[in-house]
Image (spheres, rainbow, N blue to C red):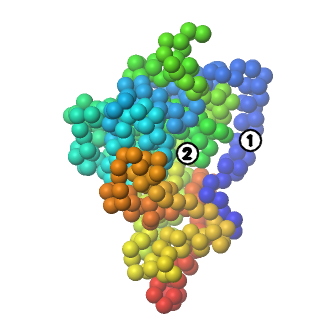
């Protein structure tokens, strides 16, 4: 059975008529840049999160970049973040000639370990940038407490967690700004690139809005050097169709995650955790193997590699997020980190593997994936005996 990591086509077919009607209306209206759908989506997403403001931008990366800039982050400032994330989290800090300071992760959630943040704070620290990785909220109570204690900004990277909830509040609403990606595979995804910044701070809102449009609030008048980072009108129209369904999409993701965890129970792997008070939305369903266990020492391959190859042979997609922690990436070598500095992140990089996850995934497909994993695991025991 061919099972993709994400099946965007199946979702599209369910909403095809509505998507085509929206796009057709936009084409007839011919307002393609910062048109009525962008403005409507901004209001709808602000309302969804219970905040005052939202600004559509060209990508999740731009959302982080412009939010950091609007929060006053600049040359020489230190921003504390996680090394176990997509590159844009730290890239955007470096865009501003600021310095990413990496704090190791909680091995249960893969999010930044809030208990280790204080030890990395210096007189140059200006902000904390937590990531709600894979759809699980970071520990925002402690992060906000630390930020208030030291007078730091908090910018939330919500790229993988649209709709996730922490202790009764949606993520993105705890810090000075929440930043979202609408990359097609996200919980709320468009059909290209797109992003958004949400905030209750009118100054941040005004600055992001100005920066996204060439530093201009009045046509052909530019008060600062800005950027071309405007959410596309067609993408905004598509997102408005899908926003009405995102809670149901997340409910189905959670249902599929529960089915996975039931089928995988008893196997020598760790299924995703959901900490108390958290509503995980499973942008990815990520399991963990034990790279140092005796079972994994077969043909010089760790268990994660064996599972990946077994799934691939059965035409089942999987992915590794992320095979090399950011602090060890060549692009960030100038920061001076080395192997062993952030052990939990380094271990996760060798042990995690993400399985197919999307709202339309069927129980039959999940069972097929899990049976493949179950068949692969006995072959990793010493002697290669099957159960």
Q: What residue is drawn where x is 43% and y is 42%? A: 90
- Which of label 2 and label 1 is nearer to you? 2
Residue 316 percent location from the top left of the image: 63, 66
Q: Residue at x 58, y 31 (%)?
A: 58
The tag earlier along the polypeptide, 2 or 1, is 1
Q: Quadrant of the N terminus?
A: bottom right
The answer to which image quadrant residue 231 occupies is top right
* Residue plotted at (57% across, 56% down): 357
Residue beneath label 2, please? 187
- Which image quarter: residue 343? bottom left
Vertically, is 379 above or below 282? below
Can residue 243 be seen here? no
Q: Residues within 10 Å of mark 1 (few under 14, many from 20)?
A: few
Task: Categorize mark 2 by other alpha carbons within 10 Å: few (<14), some (14-19), many (20+).
Answer: many
Tag 2 secondary structure = loop
SS at mark 1?
A: helix
Residue 1 is at least partly visible in this image: yes
> On the image, numbered disc 1 is attached to which residue?
16
Position in image of residue 21 (x %, y %): 75, 32
In the rendering, at what x and y percent does residue 176 appear? 37, 29
* Res. 165 image quadrant: top left
- Residue 335: mark in rendering: none
Image x and y of residue 55, in percent: 51, 25
User: Tags 2 and 1 in contact by the CB under 8 Å rule?
Assistant: no
Separation (CA) of disc 2 from disc 1: 18 Å
């Amino acid at each position: 059975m061919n099972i993709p990591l994400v099946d965007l086509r199946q979702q599209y077919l369910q909403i095809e008529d509505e998507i085509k009607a929206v796009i057709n209306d936009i084409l007839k209206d011919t307002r393609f840049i910062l048109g009525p759908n962008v403005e409507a989506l901004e209001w709808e997403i602000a309302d969804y999160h219970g905040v005052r403001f939202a600004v559509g931008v060209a990508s999740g990366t731009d959302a982080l970049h412009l939010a950091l800039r609007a929060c006053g982050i600049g040359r020489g400032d230190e921003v504390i973040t996680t090394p176990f994330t997509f590159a844009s989290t730290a890239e955007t800090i470096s865009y501003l000639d600021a310095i990413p300071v990496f704090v190791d992760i909680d091995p249960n959630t893969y999010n930044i370990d809030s208990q280790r943040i204080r030890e990395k704070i210096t007189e140059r620290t200006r902000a904390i940038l937590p990531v709600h990785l894979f759809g699980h909220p970071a520990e925002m109570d402690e992060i906000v407490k630390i930020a208030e204690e030291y007078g730091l900004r908090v910018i939330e990277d919500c790229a993988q967690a649209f709709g996730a909830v922490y202790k009764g509040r949606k993520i993105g609403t705890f810090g000075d700004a929440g930043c979202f990606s609408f990359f097609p595979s996200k919980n709320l995804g468009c059909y290209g690139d797109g992003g958004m910044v949400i905030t209750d701070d009118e100054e941040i809102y005004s600055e992001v809005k100005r920066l996204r449009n060439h530093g201009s609030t009045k046509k052909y008048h530019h008060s600062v050097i800005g950027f071309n980072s405007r959410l596309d009108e067609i993408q905004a129209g598509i997102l408005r169709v899908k926003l009405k369904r995102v809670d149901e999409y997340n409910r189905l993701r959670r249902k599929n995650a529960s089915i996975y965890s039931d089928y995988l129970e008893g196997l020598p792997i760790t299924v995703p955790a959901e900490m108390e008070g958290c509503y995980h939305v499973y942008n990815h369903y990520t399991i963990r193997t034990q790279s140092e266990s005796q079972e994994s020492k077969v043909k010089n391959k760790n268990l994660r590699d064996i599972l990946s190859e077994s799934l691939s042979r059965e035409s089942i997609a999987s992915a590794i997020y992320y095979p090399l922690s950011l602090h060890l990436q060549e692009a960030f070598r100038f920061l001076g980190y080395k192997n062993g500095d952030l052990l939990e992140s380094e271990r996760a990089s060798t042990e995690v593997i993400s399985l197919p996850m999307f709202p339309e995934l069927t129980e039959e497909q999940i069972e097929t994936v899990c049976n493949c994993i179950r068949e692969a695991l006995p072959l990793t025991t010493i002697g290669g005996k099957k159960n």
